[in-house]
Image (spheres, rainbow, N blue to C red):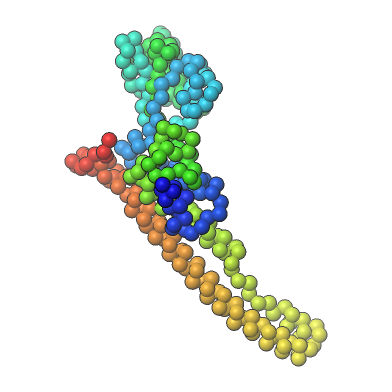
Amino acid sequence: MANNLYYFKIESLCGEVSDPKFISDVLTDTSSEIINLLDVSYLYLFSKEVNGYNGANEPWGGEQAWAESNNGYKLPSTRILNISKKDSGGEFRSAKEIPIDYEFKVQNADSVFYPSETEPVYFIKNNHLYVYGGSAISQTYPIKVNLVNYPDLAYNDSTGQAVGSDTTFTFPVELDSALVYGSAMRVRVKQLNDLTKDELPTAPSFTQVATYINTDEDIELAGAETSKISTQIQDYTAQMGKYGEKYKNMAQELANFKQNYDRALQPYIGSQAKGGPTAQAAGGARPTQ
């Protein structure tokens, strides 16, 4: 349904927005902000899992082959949720992240840090993933990468539907209100800036009066100009009143958007998040899978 489009949801809050691309940008920016604020127990909502091996096409939507293992595997995001590698028994074993200064130790078979196939390790270098332990990564022994997916959203995406260019990802419905209000905040800030730039009345000028008095020494013309400016001041005062009222109302709406954004996010952020680590330790509800 058209009413489910994010464009129309934001428009219902902010009024008409003439630039759809701007809506796409603020949706994407807000989505990234939400992900970065989430309690770690909710990052599964934005997880993406793929299998990879030497020579396979990039699993991130690209058509180029993934780099060979010794050159690392390029990642679209380094917020890793889990890395695992298939062993000779057909079981995926979770890999442990290690400091990058162990890079050469884990490749040396004589080192005590040389990993086994049951305890693989990984590190990230220059936004590339390196996994070691057991047989060489291949189609038979692939790696499984589960990381946080930062989606690119578009103005014509809809609630509950695949978003952007990723046909497998749907923005979580439980965070839909946060996305809409957070995006509306960004739109409203731009509208306030535009209002100041385009609609702020120009104050009357007394320059001509000063010229009549100081240069021309014509009191009569100065008086006539002053009378005209007096009318302009009345008009300017009325315009400033309308401008001030409009700005005040729009700023108040921005404050309301922020309040609703914070309220929508609150159950999902920080250590006190509902279902998060602290709540779970106290017997609180876990997030619905």
- Residue 128 in view here: no
Q: Position of residue 36 (x, y in %)?
A: 41, 41
Q: Position of residue 19 (x, y in %)?
A: 56, 51
Kindly give the residue lying farthest to the right in the view shown: 216
The tally of labels here is 0
Image-quadrant location for residue 216: bottom right
Decide which of 112, 280 is in the foreground and name it.
280
On screen, residue 191 versus residue 123, left or right, reads right
Kindly give the residue lying farthest to the left in the view shown: 283
Decide which of 25, 8 is in the foreground and name it.
8
Classify 90 as above or below 178: above
On screen, residue 287 versus residue 127, left or right, reads left
At x 47%, y 50%, the residue is 7
At x 52%, y 19%, the residue is 65
Q: Position of residue 87 (x, y in %)?
A: 34, 13
Classify 102 as above or below 274: above
At x 39%, y 13%, the residue is 141
- Residue 199 in view here: yes
Kindly give the residue lying farthest to the bottom in the view shown: 220
Q: Position of residue 22 (x, y in %)?
A: 54, 49
Image-quadrant location for residue 133: top left
Quadrant placement of the C terminus: top left
On screen, residue 119 versus residue 53, left or right, reads left
At x 51%, y 49%, the residue is 23
